[in-house]
Image (cartoon, helix red, strand yellow):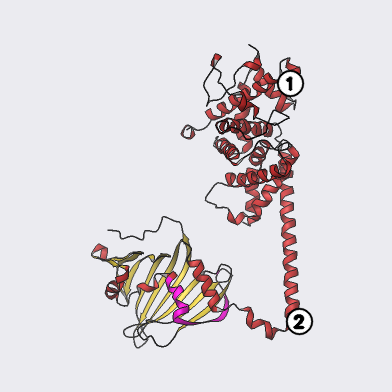
């Protein structure tokens, strides 16, 4: 198998999770696409440095994290969410956890998140659906639900925290710290 | 209670009223995924776990709601197209370099340039020494053939050698003298002590590396301990021998190899190494084969080492096994 073929297989396997990793830090989805392309191009150029005994996902997310930090330095905080090595390292840990959910593909792992979403109720669920599915900003959600802006933010934060706990509960027993 | 006054959820923080968990407002203010005006300054250290969890979920939720197989295929195709375009550009640049070099050769004349195109033997050996000094375990197949004065083969031994810089090695194999096959034989060194084990444990011996001659006397012509420290063996060649490149060969894997001849300088009659040949991989600099023509009490002895590759760390035990 040629290195390019091997790389294509690895890329197909990991591109969705790297994109999600970038979307956790980049406001603009188009910018995330650009950094995603750059990430895999850099990975291809330095593929000989990749230790094949180690999983590919964390290695390629490490490249994405470095590009994110460069991007933030160039474009400033208005385009990239709060980033430092520590926070990016912890986000990467979150993605490592997510990868341990028993599933064959990233999309199948997302089924676990869909399941957690289905269990979410009340204003937390409404806020998350309106924000992530319908693309409404907090202010628009506040108007739609007839509550304050700060309350919407809290519902979203609480909803995400609940979803996070729900996903933690889906990790195989031996993986739960 | 106004919803905006309700405390937030977080497993790391204490629970407040109604079982909800308390998250300080300062932490929330740093969650800029929901704010148009991000808060200036670094987030408090204690908030970073919570922030990272929020951001992980933010990324996953965004990905979940924009998951599209066709878009993924498009992304992959676009990246592969850029990879191929880069490869074409590199090939074009290489072709230009080759064309320029060919033009240069044509201009200067083959007879001027060709002799200098072979690297010097000293440079190739120096490169091999640098490669061998990397702190990894390397495996070699070692073959020792002893012949009598009449030139007929008297003994043939084959071993596997694991060697690392710093005088660490372990040689294992069976001893054979003609049709007579003796038992397993192991000799090793951890860089401080050299030891040998044979005859199914009946023969055990160890001595400080500095006093290895004592152990060497017991082995006779089986193997010279000095050749097992491959790094030191190659490192000493420029001091002890005249070196010259005698040609370029293609290895079994199709890669170009330099053949280097090392001939011992006259004046050291005690030395067993008379001459040696080395094959050095031109791409990596690594020695892939060493052939040694060594003197024996009566007749001759030839020893060859074929490089098999690196061994995962931790699999080689250089210390005395008892």
* Residue with the most extreme top position: B1
**Residue B267 screen position, x and y as percent:** 40, 88
* Magenta stretch contains residue B78: no
Q: Quarter-wise, where is residue B95 in the image?
A: bottom right
- Decide if residue B156 is on the left or right side of residue B288: left
Q: Quarter-wise, where is residue B119 in the image?
A: bottom right
Residue that badge 1 annotates = A141
Foreground of the two, A148 or B197: A148
- Label 2 marks which chain's residue? B
SS at mark 1 in the image: helix
**Residue B147 screen position, x and y as percent:** 36, 82
Tell me whether marks 1 and 2 sit on the same chain. Answer: no
Q: Residues within 10 Å of mark 2 (few under 14, many from 20)?
A: few
* Residue with the most extreme front position: B41
Q: Residues within 10 Å of mark 1 (few under 14, many from 20)?
A: many
- Label 1 marks which chain's residue? A
């Amino acid at each position: 198998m040629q290195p390019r073929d091997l790389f294509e297989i690895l890329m197909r396997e990991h591109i969705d999770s790297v994109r999600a990793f970038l979307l956790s830090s980049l406001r603009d989805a188009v910018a995330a696409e650009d950094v995603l392309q750059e990430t895999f191009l850099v990975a291809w150029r330095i593929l000989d440095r990749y230790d094949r005994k180690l999983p590919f996902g964390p290695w390629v997310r490490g490249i994405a994290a470095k590009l994110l930090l460069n991007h933030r330095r160039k474009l400033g905080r208005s385009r990239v969410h709060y980033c430092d090595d520590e926070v990016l390292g912890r986000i990467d840990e979150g993605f490592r956890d997510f990868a341990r959910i028993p599933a064959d593909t990233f999309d199948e792992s997302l089924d676990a998140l869909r399941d957690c979403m289905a269990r979410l109720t009340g204003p937390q669920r409404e806020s998350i659906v309106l924000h992530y599915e319908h693309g409404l900003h907090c202010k628009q959600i506040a108007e739609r639900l007839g509550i304050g802006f700060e309350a919407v933010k809290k519902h979203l934060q609480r909803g995400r925290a609940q979803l996070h706990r729900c996903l933690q509960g889906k990790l195989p027993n031996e993986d739960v710290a | 209670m106004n919803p905006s006054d309700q405390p937030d959820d977080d497993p790391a923080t204490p629970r407040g009223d109604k079982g909800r968990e308390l998250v300080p407002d300062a932490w929330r203010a740093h969650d800029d995924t929901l704010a148009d005006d991000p808060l200036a300054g670094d987030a408090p250290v204690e908030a970073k776990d919570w922030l990272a969890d929020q951001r992980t979920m933010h990324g996953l939720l965004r990905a979940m709601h924009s998951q599209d197989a066709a878009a993924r295929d498009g992304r992959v195709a676009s990246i592969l197209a850029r990879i191929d375009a880069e490869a074409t550009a590199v090939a074009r640049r290489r072709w230009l370099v080759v064309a320029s070099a060919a033009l240069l050769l044509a201009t200067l004349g083959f007879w001027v340039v060709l002799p200098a195109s072979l690297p010097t033997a000293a440079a190739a050996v120096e490169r091999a020494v640098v490669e061998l000094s990397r702190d990894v375990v390397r495996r070699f197949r070692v073959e020792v053939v002893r012949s009598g004065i009449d030139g007929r083969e008297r003994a043939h031994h084959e071993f596997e050698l694991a060697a690392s810089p710093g005088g660490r090695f372990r040689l294992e194999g069976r001893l054979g003298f003609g049709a007579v096959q003796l038992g397993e034989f192991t000799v090793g060194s951890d860089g401080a002590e050299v030891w040998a084990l044979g005859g199914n444990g009946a023969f055990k011996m160890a001595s400080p590396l500095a006093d290895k001659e004592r152990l060497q006397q017991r082995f006779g012509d089986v193997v010279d301990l000095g050749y097992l420290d491959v790094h030191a063996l190659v490192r000493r060649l420029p001091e002890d021998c005249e070196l010259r490149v005698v040609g370029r060969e293609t290895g079994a894997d199709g890669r170009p190899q330099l053949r280097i001849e090392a001939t011992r300088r006259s004046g050291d009659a005690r030395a067993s190494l008379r001459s040696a040949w080395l094959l050095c991989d031109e791409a990596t600099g690594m020695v892939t084969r060493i052939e040694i023509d060594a003197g024996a009490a009566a007749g001759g002895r030839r020893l060859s080492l074929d490089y098999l590759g690196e061994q995962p760390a931790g699999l080689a035990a250089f210390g005395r096994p008892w």
